[in-house]
Amino acid sequence: MQKPFGSLVRASTFSFSTASKAPTTSSQPTVGTAAEDALSASIFASSTERQENKPLFTLPRAQGTLESPWRDVEWTEEQRTSLMKTVSSYRQSCDEGTQARVLLLGPVGSGKSSFVSSVQSVFNGRVTNRAMVGSSSTSFTKKSFNIHGQKGEDPTGLVLCDIVGLGGEEMAGLTLHDILSVIKGHVPEGHKFSPDQPVRSETVGYVKRPSLKDKIHCVAFVVDASKILTYSKRFSITFQHLREHISDLGVHQVALLTHIDKICRETAKDVTQVYKSHIIRDTMSKAGDLLGMSTSYIVPVKNYSSELDLDQDTDVLLLSAVDHILQYADLYFQDNTPQDAGPKII
């Protein structure tokens, strides 16, 4: 039995170039090897060891806002409409019918499913929350959901996949081999993961020759801004080892910084202040250090949680994140498409 790579509280799937600091290796890793088992074992220590780990970061008590934003965003209804059209009309051209499949990876409770629900809410025209899929500590299901366009429109060209929640006290969860199998497209829809039954060629429904539409085209790491100070150095190693293996597969990666409203009062009151916030800027820098990637790959988001109605500025921030994701997912298609082809914008 392979040692689990990370703990997983639930696994559900819903239908972005590699960061400049991403670790690289000269050859692609071989999954299911002794080296992989050693990697899994070295990253996840006992609960006692984890409790002894000190937080990796500290943040200055910066308050107030900057005079000028460090990123420019148009907080208008016109921009919201433009972003919705961009996302709705996105189609890649290397394989007809293939949607951009994006895998969300992050710690338990980082806001992965909330992001999926929030994005779908924007297109639904009302706030909706999906029920959590999978609650057993030993069995987790792969299930896909398309991000649908507005009423009367075809589904968008985007599929968001939420499978793994890293961390926790137990050593049960997906192995590194299983995570990479999902990215490679070997894992069938509806497959139930179990730590004592890793994905292999004998697995029922195993996709031996995955096509482009079966694979993950981009990975988005999800980090909770309000918990950035609680992550230990071991967690940083976890993220960066994951990124190393994912990079070896040629899959581009970005990151989402969630729960920004929990760390900045000004942004909680007015989302348009997000890029003027000292604390959010500093937290994004810490997230970059945690993941080993430049902040240019990281975007902040505010998910819908207790709200009953949509908010224009929150929608703009969410849609900007989706547009960011699609740009990097499209790089994967460009890498696997003849040079004379490109994305289709209808």
Image (cartoon, helix red, strand yellow):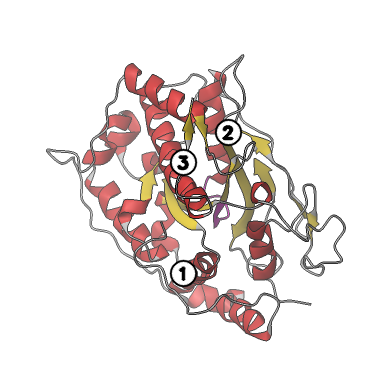
The residue mark sitting in front, 1 or 2, is 1
Q: Amino acid at mark 2?
A: Ser
Q: Residues within 10 Å of mark 3 (few under 14, many from 20)?
A: some
- Residue 342 has which mark? 3
User: What quarter of the picture does the N terminus occupy?
Assistant: bottom right
Residue hosting label 2? 117
Q: Secondary structure at mark 2?
A: helix
Q: Position of residue 189 (x, y in %)?
A: 77, 47
Who is closer to the viewer here, 101 or 228?
101
Q: Is residue 109 magenta-colored?
A: yes
Q: Secondary structure at mark 3?
A: loop
The residue mark sitting in front, 2 or 3, is 3
- CA–CA distance in space, label 1 to label 3: 31 Å
Stretch of the chain drawn in magenta:
104-111
Report the residue at 60% width, 52% height from top.
Answer: 216
Relative placement, left or right, of 68 versus 270 is left
Residue hosting label 1? 240
Q: Amino acid at mark 3?
A: Gly
Q: Is residue 97 magenta-colored?
A: no
Residue 49, above or below 283: below
| Furthest residue in direction top, as rendered | 152
